[in-house]
Every structure is written in C-alpha cells, then in structure tokens.
Amino acid sequence: MKLSLALCVSAVCGASAFSPADMKPGPDGLVRLPLAKDPLTMARLKSQSRNGVSVSQQGTIVIDDYENAQYYGPISVGTPPQTLNVIYDTGSANLWVPNIHHLLSPHKTYNHDKSSTYKPNGTIFDIEYGSGPVSGFFSEDTFNMGGYDVKDYTFAEVNNTKGLGPAYSIGKFDGICGMGWSQITQGGEPSPFQALANTKQLPKNVFAFYLGTASSPVAPEANSELVIGGSDPNHYTGEFTYEPLTKDGYWQIALGGLEVGGASMTTVTKAIVDSGTSLLAGPPDDVKKIAEAVGAKKIPFLPEYTIDCNASAPDIDVKIGANTYTLTIKDYVIEDAGECIFAMTGIDVPAPAGPLWILGDVFMRKYYVEFDLDNNRLGFAPSK
Ligand SMILES: *[C@@H]1O[C@H](CO)[C@@H](O)[C@H](O)[C@H]1NC(C)=O
Ligand SMILES: *[C@@H]1O[C@H](CO)[C@@H](O)[C@H](O)[C@H]1NC(C)=O
Ligand SMILES: *[C@@H]1O[C@H](CO)[C@@H](O)[C@H](O)[C@H]1NC(C)=O
C-alpha cells in the first residue's frame, strides 16, 4: 500500500500534489497511493548506487530514508546480479522491477537479456492504482535479498509505471518488493519472503525494520535497516511483546483501540503494520476526530493536516493486546521547512479487507516491529 506523504504544504503545493479524488481501491479492496518524493539530483543518485546488495552484510539491508518520505533498499535480480532499489513494503506481496529505460530517467532497470538465469514466462502482471496501472509481465530469474539467493523466482518486469503518478519519475525507488504473505500475491506464486523462507537459508523466517529519521548521506550512522532472518537487539529496548496475526495476507493484528486523552477515537478493531505507508492512516471520520483532538488543521484539497510544531498537543494511544503504544507530538508530526504535518491521514479501505487502521512508518519509527512468518505473529518493542 503506497501512501503519498504530501510534503507540499498549502500554497507551496500546486499541481504536483496527488489528488485524493483519484484514489480508488484496487482489486483486493485496498487503496494504493504513490509516495511523494523530492526531485532527484545526479549527485543524489550517485550516492545511492553504492547500495549494492554485495556491500551489505548477510541478512542486513541498508535502507535510505529520504526526508521521512520513503524507505527503500537494494535488491538484485539476475546473473550477474543487477541491483535496483525497492521499497520493502509489508503491505503488498509481489516483487516488481522496471524494465524500460527512458532517457534521463533516474531509475535503474532490469534487462533480462543480460541475465544467464532468466527464463521467460510472459503472463501479464497488472496492478491498478488510483492514478493508473503498474503493469508488465512475469519472468523467472534469481533474486537476491540481503545476500540470499532465491532461484527461479517468478516476479514482474514492469514496463508501465503510470499508476504511481508523476512522483515515480523523480522518485528514488525503482521497484517494490512486497513483504506481505503469499495470500495477497498476484499471480499465485509465493511472496518473495515466503519464497526465501522456502529455501531454508534463514536461521529464522523473520525480518524486522529499523526506521531511523536521518537521511543516510547526511548521517550514515543513523541509517535505517531491514534485518532478514531475525531482529537487531541494537535497535530495540526490552523484550518483544508478541501479537498473533488475525489474518495472513497483510501483517494484520487486532486493534484494541485508539485514544486521545483517554477518549476513544475509533470503533475499528483491525490494524495492519505497513512499511510501505508513510503515515498513520485510518477511516477519514476517525482521523478527523483525532485531528480535532490534537488541534491539527486540514490542508485544503488533501487528506492531510498541518499542526503547530510547538503545540502542546495530547498523546495518541494505540492499544494492541495488553499494551499501549503511545505516540507523542514529537512522534506524530513531520517537520518540513518550519511547518509541521500531522502524520495521520484518512483512507477508506472497503470491506472485507477494511475498515482498518494502517500503522505506517510513523509508528514503526517509534516501535521496532519484528515480522515473524514462522509463528504468524508480530513483535513490538520500543525502538532505539
Ligand atoms: C508463469 O507463471 C505463473 C505463476 O507462477 C504460472 O502459473 C504459469 O504457468 C507460468 N507460465 C509459463 C508460460 O511459464
Ligand atoms: C508491456 O509488455 C506487455 C507484454 O509483453 C505488452 O503487451 C505491452 O504492450 C508493453 N507495454 C509497453 C508500454 O511497452
Ligand atoms: C518552535 O520551537 C522552536 C524550538 O523548539 C523554535 O526554534 C521555533 O521558533 C518555534 N516556532 C514557533 C512557530 O513558535
């Protein structure tokens, strides 16, 4: 599930903003939105290209956070490996990479003619986003995630990225690696992580994200990471509290409630943890109520809100199982050139998948989340 972080606040915004009116649920009932990105420079692009899988430690993928808007990391496809940047997205379950190189396009592409392990498939791959399709065809090849090879994997070569909107052309990710369950994979193959699990290479079929706040070229020590095969004790405190998944597909758990100052803000009892969504997202009426409670103001024509950076706004309490996960104003605002965005947005996810809450990167920065495929559960601990 992609969510645009509208970095363009009020007047600065203009025509480049995505239109919420374009939002439509996809075939699986979920809304997918493009991530917004700032323009990419060549210098920036070059600073990314060092992110080969080959330079990562086995099991650890370094992910770049670009001004809190998106997290993406390297993956390679083919033999010899062709490295691209993907968003590791727990809200979807396909791997796709672009195969058409446009002049001046910042994106890296996959060329199957240059891979000795490529095998054709040709079945059409097609996802409808609010703003259009992302489509192409399936192919078979080796992919490598964090140093682990998965051979003969059926993934998508994408030759049309229109559905991601204009943001894609200046975006820093090339493709998407869905980290959800095979139940939500298009095309009936195991999801990438399930396929990796099937190779029995991992000590544990677990992955976890550390989502930092610094952008890596500026503060390399604050790099974010996706850990494959376990979770990184350097990045959480105490013990995990585990919650059983209530449904495989998305990483979905039971939500006990959402409160501001002890007052209940939602009756929705489902939540998913989604690394591919920047903000917290929920039913628009609930979000409106919460925005009022914390003093946030709607941005005209956008589903997002602004908030006074220095407001003494109340905490937002997310109840999961027996625990309360508190987000203070420090956690739920995103500062952008002196203005603050309230990091919560309204999304209507229709039944049967919805309504639900999406605990996106904003939540995952404060709480380290372990995604445990072996035990159908999520582990939560304060991030450090
Ligand atoms: C293409 O991949 C799909 C999904 O795995 C599979 O069902 C189909 O048989 C494959 N087609 C060819 C021609 O290999
Ligand atoms: C993408 O590939 C499909 C399948 O080969 C083809 O039908 C379609 O015309 C291609 N689209 C573009 C934009 O090249
Ligand atoms: C908010 O507080 C910061 C220091 O925490 C200060 O630098 C800034 O000027 C304040 N902004 C406003 C609008 O009061």
Image (spheres, rainbow, N blue to C red):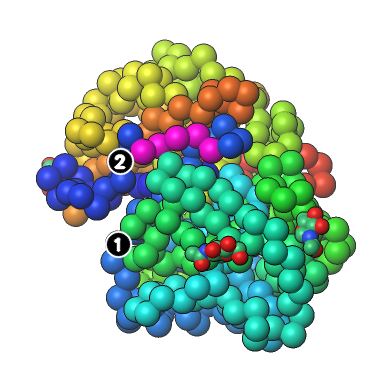
Q: Is residue 66 magenta?
A: no
Nearest-to-viewer mark from 2 and 1: 2
Q: Secondary structure at mark 2?
A: loop
Q: Which quarter is ligand 2 in? A: bottom right
- Judge whether 282 appears above or below 36 on screen: above
Residue 92: x and y in percent read: 61, 47
Decide which of 29, 374 is in the foreground and name it: 29
Q: Which residue is mark 1?
A: 38
Q: What residue is shown with label 2?
A: 19
x and y, in percent, of residue 153 in the image: 76, 65
Main secondary structure type of the part rendered in magenta? loop
The residue at the point 74 percent across, 85 percent down is 116
| Mark 2 neighbour density, 10 Å: few (under 14) some (14–19) many (20 or more) | some
Q: Is mark 1 within 8 Å of ligand 3?
A: no
Residue at figure coordinates x 44%, y 24% from the top left: 283
| In the image, residue 59 above or below residue 300 | below
Instruction: Look at 62% across and 23% down and name the residue there.
Output: 352
Magenta segment? 22-26
Q: Label 2, label 1: how many angstroms apart (C-alpha)?
A: 17 Å
Residue 344: tell me if it is visible: no
Mark 2 beta carbon near ligand 2 (under 8 Å): no
